[in-house]
Amino acid sequence: MAAGQEILAAADAENYGIGTREEDCQWELNYPVMAITVHIWKELAISGTLCPDMESAFNNNVRGLRMIKGLPKTLSTSILEEFVIGHQEAIRDELLKECFCDIAPVRRFLRGDKDFLLGVKGAGKSAIFKQLITKRIAFQNPKELHQILVPIDQDIDYLGVKSHLSTALESAVVDEDIRMRFVWEIYILYRMIVTLVESSIVIDDEDMAVINPMQEYFSFENKKPSILELITRANRTIGCKLDISHTGFPVPDFYIKSEPNQIVQAPKTDVRTVFLNLAEIQSKVNSILRRNNAVIYVLIDNLDDFLAREAYDAQRMVIQGLISCVKDYSRHTYIFIKAFLRNEVFHKVDFEKLGGAEKIKPNAVDLIWEDRDIRRFLAERLLYNIHKLLGIDKFSISIEEGDLRKRPFVTRLLPRKLLKLFGIDEHEALDVTERDFMCRQIITTFMPREVQHFDASGNPINGLDLFEYTQTHFCLANSRATPRAILIYLDKLLQVSDAYYADRLYPEIELNEEGEYPLFLRQHVLEAYGMLQKDMVAYISSAVTHPEWKERITSLLSNIGRKTEFKFRELRKLIDYDEQDQDAKELLAFLEHLGVLVCENKSVHLPDRKYHVPVLLQKNWVEEKGVGL
């Protein structure tokens, strides 16, 4: 149906009880080029019947309601050569700026009152980190204070840090977690002071006299040393003594007993030892920021490598020390530390040492992608290509209001005040939001509404709804789909489809009656999924550094067969361990850590536990049978 040729003028529609409302809304991409007009057609609400001509016109139009309007009638499949969907690694994702999704957990984190952003591998923590340090997004400051960012995203040699802790600290404290907290205290303070001095912040001589010794006695040619460099290269003696707080918990009182660095010329006085009071320096940094109407955000990322055995314990120690350090810094109103962590590592720390889980967990945001968020993520990547490759700046989508009207059951049970508390308008609490409806239409512009798949036994499944497919087939155990999995899959889908059309000299395809291009065919979707499964098995195997475990995990993934659920004894045989072998328990725990298995009944004894394998890691029937369903 051509633009502007709707079935009726609004006035005529009202005469027959058919109302329309038209909304012009800006699609929430970060580049304002796609103006999408949304036509929301009200349901037929009349007493009596329509005249024959009117009824015919209405019925003919219904077929064209659920589609995007304004697309060309034909499309050359050669556009696949230029199709861009982005890269799985945030640092290399060329579409991150244009297609960044500020989903609900991201917005909550950017309010600035939470210290930890938690998510599974691939959830997008590093993408948010990159957006922050490039200042495309920012934390919300209540007083519009100037934001100074201190990004820390270096790889950490966990075993190296752990092995040097005992020699780097002069203290009666033997607890490694407290020692690690001290290392973080020094490291973060040093990085903050270097950043402050190099910024436009005004620092008077009196303040400089307090903070400058941190630069002088931890002087590095590289202004961004690693934590291990700080421990091993600085010629320091650093110490800690314990006091007992009113709560009964030990409170470390840290100090630095510092011999001047050989790089720095020694002071003219004969004093060769300097004591640095870290608490005093922290307070001074906070007061400098206050006077300059500024805040510092220390952003810490890249701590979530999959590690096993001793390295895993060392990683837990480093994270424990960091969380303790963040908790300590929370008393400073102009200094904020934001850590981006994998949630299973975060939950492995000893919260009792930190004053209890109730003191820490409320300060974390879980970066969970709801099904509609994944659809939005996919739709925005496709929309970018609609604009760039088809040269379309504007188009319209028509929606029947009946598709949006039904309210979810849960919202009918909630009082109005509670709905408002969560920012939900009772009249807008819909099963399918207008934006989600648009996302679905954009996705099916190129992708089939129904796909093919094999079940766990190798039986073909036809007619699987595309959106059910994206909800259930791109998750590791105990998780939801992630942007990383979707991007890896889209890359495979592009490879398969481009090769298919290249062999056929890139024919043109026509827009069908539903306003969709048959670009990505069902067999392409299936073949790409088989490639994704193969890649995920290789990825998991590569994440295991312990040689013996690597061999056993690779063997397990290769011999899963048709089964999707296992008892502990069955898994123990697959990984070739004796029943009493402690390594079997450790390895199964690590497999849960990787997302290969999820335990369904952790409350029972180990021999009675049951585990299941996610669809993504089940037997790869595509590789065995091909795509000819």
Image (tube, rainbow, N blue to C red):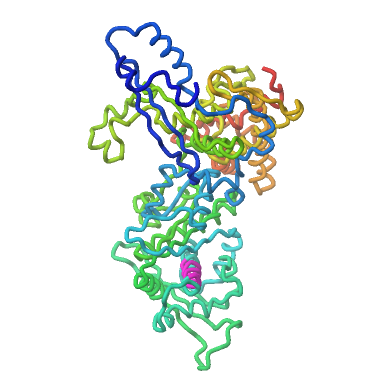
Residue 165 % position (x, y)? 55, 67
Relative to 408, 481 lies left or right = right
Who's the residue at 33% across and 26% down the image?
A: 407
61 is higher (above) or lower (below) than 178: above
- Does residue 581 appear anywhere in the picture? no
Who's the residue at 59% across and 31% down the image?
A: 616
- Does residue 152 appear anywhere in the picture? yes
Q: Quadrant of the C terminus?
A: top right
Residue 376 % position (x, y)? 48, 36
Residue 498 % position (x, y)? 70, 32
Who's the residue at 70% across and 27% down the image?
A: 623
Q: Nearer the viewer, residue 528 or 32?
A: 32
Q: Nearer the viewer, residue 428 or 15?
A: 15
Residue 434 % position (x, y)? 40, 31
Whether residue 190 appears in magenta in the rendering, the answer is yes
Magenta part of the protein: which range?
A: 185-195
193 is higher (above) or lower (below) than 541: below
Relative to 553, 254 lies left or right = left
Relative to 264, 211 lies left or right = left
165 is higher (above) or lower (below) than 122: below
Judged by its main secondary structure, the magenta piece is helix
Q: Nearer the viewer, residue 516 or 207?
A: 516
Q: Extreme bottom residue here?
A: 269
29 is higher (above) or lower (below) than 187: above
Whether residue 121 appears in magenta in the rendering, the answer is no
Quadrant in the rendering for residue 87: top right
